[in-house]
Image: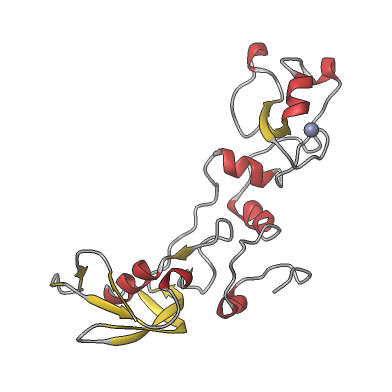
Amino acid sequence: MCVVGIGPAIQCAGERSVLVTIHVQAESPATCPALVLNADFRPLSYYPLSIWCWQDAIKAVFLDRVNIVSQYDTLVRSPSFEMRLPSVVSLKSYVKPSRFPAFTRFNVFLRDRFTCQYCGDRDDLTFDHVIPRSKGGVTSWENVVAACSCCNLRKADLLPSVARMWPACEPYQPTVHDLHQNGRLFPPNYLHSSWMDYLYWDSELEP
Ligand SMILES: [Zn+2]
């Protein structure tokens, strides 16, 4: 049995601070993340998957912000309480998902399914401005695509018509839904069995 402190204090609903020392049995708690569902029981996001470390999950339980949907066998104990670590929690208040995702490197790769838009390669991905910046191209969803470093070098700062290289899909601003769809193709390595009912991965993927 190991002893783990979970942060300096847990702030309870009544603004009362409680110092808690938690004893964790058996399995390392590090292997017990909680899947976080919205109040409508959908995952907050598919990729990166919405998961919390067990400490955050327990804090949220104490703050009365989540319902416990499913639990691990791993037990945590303090002098005043004992509980099994949550494996699935659902928010009590619905969080309205935003329609458009942030324009980030990761999300551009995810939109393009981690595939070079010129040759289909998946290794050594970089970003390419379809209209080069030197020709007035801007850094936006509509002008940036995933490209392997070979294609990026080959295209250099040429226009597609000069380089005779066009992206497989015309770049566009994706919705969160688009990225969720693509995220299902790239599940994370760790999926607990209790999460399966809430994740709609493609059926051909291994459990
Ligand atoms: Zn390429």
Q: Residue 24 vs residue 150: left or right?
A: left
Question: Residue 23, how many percent across, how many down?
Answer: 30, 80
The single residue placed furthest to the top in the displayed view is 134
Q: Can residue 34 be seen from the camera position used here?
A: no
Q: Nearer the viewer, residue 174 or 200?
A: 200
> Which image quarter has ligand 1?
top right
Q: Which quadrant of the view contains residue 2?
A: bottom left
Q: Nearer the viewer, residue 205 or 167?
A: 205
Q: Residue 165 vs residue 71: left or right?
A: right
Residue at the (68%, 27%) spot, across then down = 128
Question: Residue 104, how many percent across, how many down?
Answer: 54, 39
Q: Nearer the viewer, residue 94 or 86?
A: 86
Residue at the (45%, 72%) spot, across then down = 39
Residue at the (76%, 72%) spot, across then down = 203
Q: Can residue 185 be seen from the camera position used here?
A: yes
Question: Residue 200, how many percent across, how many down?
Answer: 66, 70
Q: Residue 68 vs residue 202: left or right?
A: left
The single residue placed furthest to the front in the displayed view is 1
Colour scheme employed for the rendering of this structure = secondary structure
Q: On the rendered image, what quadrant is the C terminus found in?
A: bottom right
